[in-house]
Image (tube, coloured by chain):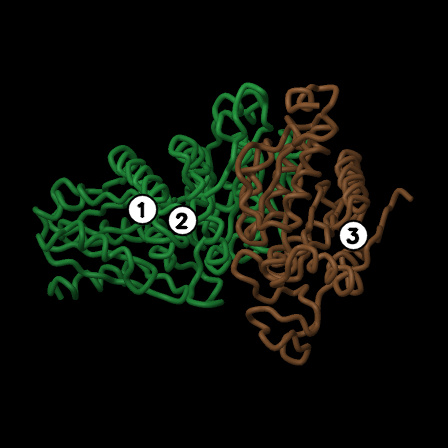
Amino acid sequence: MKGNEAIAISAIRNGVDGYFGYPITPQSEVMETLMKEKPWETTGMVVLQAESETSAVNMIYGGACCGKKVMTSSSSPGVSLMCEGISYMAGTELPCVIVDVMRGGPGLGTIQPSQSDYDMIVKGGGHGDFHNIVIAPASAQDMYDYVDWGFELAFRYRNPVIILADGIIGQMMEKVEMHPSKPRRTAEEIRRDAPWATTGKTPDRPRNIMTSLSLDSDIQEVFNRKLARKYAEIEANEVKYTEYLTDDAEYLFVAFGCSSRICEAAVDELRQNGVQVGLLRPVTLYPYPFTRIGELASGMKSIMSIELNLGQMVNDVRLAVEGKCPVGFYGRQGGNIFTPEEVVDAFLKFNNLK
Amino acid sequence: MDTADIKKPENIVYRKPALITDNVMHYCPGCSHGVVHKLIAEVIDEMGIQESTIGICPVGCSVFAYNYIDIDWEEAAHGRAPALATATKRLCPDKHVFTYQGDGDLASIGTAEIIHACSRGENIVVIFINNGIYGMTGGQMAPTTLIGMKTSTTPYGRDPKLNGFPMVIADMISHLDGTAFITRQSVHTAAAVRKAKSAIRKAFEYSEKNIGLSFVEIVSTCNSGWKMNPVDANKWMVENMFRKYPIGDIKDILK
């Protein structure tokens, strides 16, 4: 199935309570698949087409307030509109999953694949002092698996989780292995697991108020510091990455999502020509594998960040490397995709091997 | 009769509604919000639906409504309350869900959200406080500001050539098939308060019937923003606001 379809099927099979979305290329198949599957007749999952991305994200804000497993999906221009709601959810400490199937920008840009929302999502995603947990799929299987993993992280930390995909991962057809399905949680389970939620005030507890508002700067600062402790915990426990042929590597590529797949082929090609190169794929973009990249940097002749943008993640690679070796960048923009050969060529040029 | 006698249950003729908390209200003296809060609290209490009611606060003066009525609350971003209410009601269909919004929130930044919630026929209640001005940010022009009315962003009076015309939201949404009950009320006299209360009660009852959205507009005073004392503000409202926003039921699909 397509990556976008995998998101939809996984949501139904993993007990998601609600999906609220707005059509935008290249991810419209998510809502189309959900509407076709009619999960309200089977699991009771709510699916609703909102009037805008702004409304969609505020619908999941409302659903998350009730302790429900709610999600939306969109693509770059739509996610810009969602940043308001993402910030409110971070400020209200609400769990949710948002899928960004990135396309070329800025502005209306193109509808072809890109990775140009790295900075927006990993460094920001709305106003104020907060982090999204960001996970980056590289296959249709990842799209399927990360929905459930995303909700696990979202509820563990009461924090928005963004699945940062791209047009290739969304549109590419691959085999997907489906795991046994999970039922939706009952009202009692929600009251137990989310005692903070607006489930209706009962005599045994004070009223629950889901808000990010505080007019007192001291109270806001205490809250911001609480968030900082949460983020420290996330950074300590949730960093995830994969490595490919890094044991004996003298050079390293760093790439996420679809770029990591292309880089794998570039590594194979270079290795056939006797160049000892490896690949690190950050799976979590926040928290970022700074420590591991720093460790690897000590033994490398150079590290290149390969991205479908003008060079966004490369700044994090530089932070991780701390000057231990040269850091290079190669990318394509506007919805264009590099071939493994182009990556090899860029690598050879950057390292003066040509 | 001494104080102890007065406090005897049989002598009490009026008391704070059970669901109004002891927090000190931040509203200005003469403001309509306090009365409307009281009416909502009374209706929820009398219908026995405290455990099943979820309120959605707006951004504006009533942003702190959650401090005053003892139910679960969600605090929306500016104008987005109907979107939160939509999801809350659809995900928890056994709940009574209402939004409480001012005219800056509902009639300006939140027009898309309210119109589409109405159009979809969400089974929610919307309480719309229309005082023709932005109260919280210091008295700026709202979409509902009357022609000629002075505000901090229309210091020479609202000029339609410069600022456009007032929006009559309740009449606009009455044309949408998803709305079930639309009424315009006020709380400036005892009689008006009683009528407003039965309208709010009807709206909550309609929301149980799954027949569409119920909308109660309360034409209100903002004496601080209007720069009038409460008595003059009430008089000004009757003479000016009621002409553009006449009191009465606009739509009732069960009639």
> Which callout, 1 or 3, points to the residue nearer the camera?
3
| Tags 1 and 3 on a common chain | no
> Which callout, 2 or 3, points to the residue nearer the camera?
3
Give the crowd class for mark 1: few <14, some 14-19, many >=20 residues within 10 Å.
many
Q: Earlier in the sequence, mark 1 or mark 2?
A: 2
Is the residue under label 3 in contact with that under label 2 (CB below 8 Å)? no
Q: Is residue A110 visible?
A: yes
From the viewer's perspective, is A165 left or right of A218?
Answer: right
Q: Residue furthest right?
A: B255
For the point 84% across and 52% down, the residue is B248
Name the residue beneath numbered marker 3. Answer: B184
The kind of residue tagged 3 is Arg
For the point 65% across and 65% down, the residue is B143
Badge 1 element = strand
On the image, the x and y values in percent for residue A325 come to 9, 55
Question: What colour has chain A?
Answer: green
Name the residue beneath numbered marker 1. Answer: A285
Name the residue beneath numbered marker 2. Answer: A164
Image quadrant where one finds the C terminus of chain A? bottom left
Q: Chain of mark 3?
A: B
Question: Toward the viewer: A41 or A151?
Answer: A151
On the image, the x and y values in percent for residue B114 come to 67, 53
Which chain is rendered brown in the image? Answer: B
Q: Quadrant of residue A233?
A: top left
Is the residue under label 2 in contact with that under label 1 (CB below 8 Å)? yes
Is the residue under label 3 in contact with that under label 1 (CB below 8 Å)? no
